[in-house]
Amino acid sequence: MPHSKAITRALLLIAISLYTAFSAGPFAWTAMLSFRTTSEISKAPYAWPETFRWQKYVEAWTGSNYDTYFVNSMVITVLAVLVTTVVGAMAAHCLARYRFRGNRLIYFIIFSTIIFPPQITIIALFQTLVDYGLYNSRVGLILVYVSVQLPLTVFLLEGFFARLPQDLFDAARMDGYSDAEIFWKITVPIGMPAIVTTVILNTVHIWNEFLYAVVLISDESKRTLPLGIQKFMGDQLEDIGMIATGMMIAVIPIVIVYAIFSEKLIQGMTAGAVK
Amino acid sequence: MTDASVGRGAIRPLGRVFRISPDGPPLGTVMTFLTPALLVYLVFTAYPVLRTFYNSVHILHPRAADEYVGMQHYVQMTTADPTFWVAVKNTMIWAGFAPLLDVGIGLILAICLYAKAPFARFFRIAWFTPVLISYVVVGILWMWIYNFDWGILNGALRAVGLESWTRAWLGEPDTALVAVMVTHTWKWAGFNMVVCLAALSALPKEVLEAAELDNCNWFGKAWFVMIPMIRPTLVNLLILSLIGKMKIFDLVWIMTQGGPLWATETVSTYVYKRAFQWQTFDLGYPSAIAVFWFFVVLVAVMALKYAFRQRDRLEY
Amino acid sequence: MKSAIRATALVAVTALTVMPAAKADTELSLWSHWADQGSKIEFIEAGIEKFEAAHPGVTVKPTWYQKNPLFAALKGALQAGQGPDVFYCEPAQTEYIDNGFLLPLDDHLEMSNIEGWAADTWRHEGNVYALPLEAYTVEIYFNTEMLEDLGFDLPEDGQLSAADFKKLVEAAAGEGITPIVQGAGDRPFPGAYLTHEVLLKKIGIDAYGDLLAGTKKWSDPDVMEALDYMESLIEAGAYPRSFATMKLGESHYYFYSNPGGLMLPMGSWYTSRAFNAPDQGGQPEGFPLGIMQAPALDESACPECKTANIGGSFCVNAESPNAELAAEFLNAYADPEMGNLWLQKVLVQTGIKSDASTVSGPHAGYFKMLEAADKNNTFFQGTPHAILKGQCLETFKQVINVAFPAGQVGAGQAAQMMDQACSAG
């Protein structure tokens, strides 16, 4: 038996390595490109950088207003994700825990709008924002992001919350927990794996969002990072080396955020398993 | 945090006042939890969606009165627009295959990590990285990979002597759709992995230990114990993936804009073309497509839910 | 209930919104394309300075976009009554005029300083609706050294017969050189350049206009002769294998740097990419650039014909409270001095009256060559992607721009697809 187990293990490792090359290879390749100039790249697209040209990152950052875009993206993403998570978790908890008339109807209505393509609703959304004086404002963009990400958040969280054992909540109520306490002290901690999943997903979506950012914001000083990145995306010049640098600047922060949060995710999952 | 503090303070007094029924939950509690979500929803989601329904039966003149045309757009779309049907076909192909692929790969990866593969932490991040990258970046990156002259795919084929297999992957009608589909799956498999992993980690250890005692191997454990137990998660993922494919837009728009010869045209790219690229301010026709498609997707999702409905609820 | 929600939302929103800062006396807003084209930005800013100096208390605030994001943003803003005072526009965007978004500019611009043909591009029912700033011609750029190495000699007037042109293509392909570098991966027009030049020469200005207007069939024998000739070039390997996915920027680099090719049919705004520094994707120092005429089939109706068009223009938002002032701002550009400044900075033609001999510096020679290449031409104003509409345009983009030159459909099938899409609507 130990012999065949070793073979299985070796096969598993080979499969895992191949998939890793597939999934992370392109990213690693971009990282290499980001340190090389376009003329170096055109001679040998897959070579290791002979000299690491760090100054390309400085150029990309200073040459294009990146600092402003970056701060805007940070503020907007953090606030929008926070509000989405709290509001979405409250709604999901309510829909999963309380039986009342119209529960499924509300769930269905919220869920069904996930289906609508944003490309078509954006103009009506634009008019709404103008009506409320929220056009070309960061607050408006945050609220739009909250509304866009909310259905998905509710859908994912409701699915998870509904499967938490009812005994837990009955016991809590026996102990005299209020409704608010049940939400904050039972649902949120135990639901943490699902909540963290939605946080990651929402962060990624909002950080990378382009269409709303370009249509709903017109001030240079309020623009977000995807608009800055667009500048490098080779519409005008085919400067592959610089495009790769711009891509890396866009990707690195979100990878760091994920690396931090994924630890939380694991902790959360362990906490959930202990229950 | 304003919303949260409002939630905390307001629950009790309201909860004592209103009750829906003697044994139901207090209305106040329900409203406190739901109101913030519903408010955002009504203002920023419901209105634009209803507006789209309205637009779909009108021809819009931005500086004059809207012209009611009844079902005209719907009739034109279904009877006299071949491009629309090509878009439907492509989207259906995509939605038919890709969700199984996405969730299947995600599940296998999750089980690998759950089985305590070495370097699990590294793999978890490496496999998830594509999810983090924006569509613009993913699109450009894969256009380089598929590049005819110096892309790595053709490079690899030439290296192993398969010169005749090389092609402009995104430029030929036969391969373009598959090429974009592979890219999309590359991006999303990691997300499915993380969700599956979360669901697996939440399983009670005792069940798996019991399976261990029954002398189950890993495959048996995965197939007979784990998958049935995380089935609700898998169904949710399938539904999400299905919806994602049914409204797929960004990646296609960046990589092929629906070409060549409409080989990658999807319903959403066609809607966008009609709304933003046809030199018109009339949103009527694209709105009609969006509404029609909304119902198609809704039916598809409900069919999927029905097909995978839980016959006997698993309790643990 | 609804009004209650609205009221609550309004209160919440008012509390959250940051109050806007105090404004200058009058501020005109300008939304423009060209976010990444420094020389054009410099030109526009020179006009802003000139205008602001002449109008104390008035400032112009430009916002720079890429083209597609700009068009998307304008679509939303104009419909919601939030459009900028002045914005970038192109002659194809007749929907602005149809819906009354544009202020007629005849009475505001110094029309004697604007070329008549340029103004005509924007003339609808007697009114001119934009400042026609950027003008261009469709040229065939080529590598003179490569041409010599292949043993070909270009006549004085740059005109090859259809038969000689085909021999040239075959010779280059035989040597493993890409004869016609072109990429249709990210634009709706480059793949159709050569086809349409051949077609225009063959059938002449009037018939070509009819073809684009949908009153002449693509299956017409004269049109088919041009398409069949193109098909023979395509079969001889005229275009690169990567044609369908190659992007516009890539095709430039492919032509003059790596791997190099013989010809590049391109709008005369070729310079905006090629004249950048070589390490930013521009052409190498001392690149042997030449310009030739498109091949003319025997018995062509108009062998001297060539396509020209107005590109980037500026429009005034008719709904703006400052519309008159905004038009006055645009008039700052309707001035031969500004025309010369445009030529000098941007190295592309302009619809403003200008004098090409004033261009100095390293690219003066290029401008003389361009002038020489255009001096005997008769111009058709307008490109297919600016004239065709709806399903016909969509089919043009997919078939004539991509599938036909990529060899995915033949001449007969292409013509049939165009007829089906263009005569129906």
Image (cartoon, helix red, strand yellow):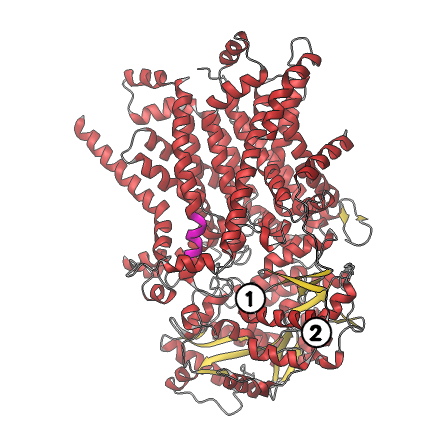
- A239 is higher (above) or lower (below) than B281: below
| Chain bearing mark 1 | C
Task: From the viewer's side, name the closer residue of C281 and A228.
Answer: A228
Task: From the viewer's side, name the closer residue of C425 and C307.
Answer: C307
Q: How many marks?
A: 2
**In the rendered image, which residue does mark 2 sit on?**
C332
Residue C76 in the image, given as x and y percentages of width and height: 68, 52
Instruction: Identify the amino acid type marked 2.
Output: Ala
Q: Are marks 1 and 2 on the same chain?
A: yes
Q: Nearer the viewer, mark 1 or mark 2?
A: 2
Most common SS among magenta residues: helix
Residue A205 in the image, given as x and y percentages of width and height: 52, 42
The residue under the point 40% across, 69% down is C279
On the picture, is B223 further left or further right than C214?
A: left
Q: Quadrant of the C terminus of chain A?
A: top left
Start and end of the magenta stretch? A244-251
**In the rendered image, which residue does mark 1 sit on?**
C401
Residue B137 appears in view: yes
Residue C75 in the image, given as x and y percentages of width and height: 68, 55
Q: Quadrant of the N terminus of chain A?
A: top left
Instruction: Identify the amino acid type marked 1.
Output: Asn
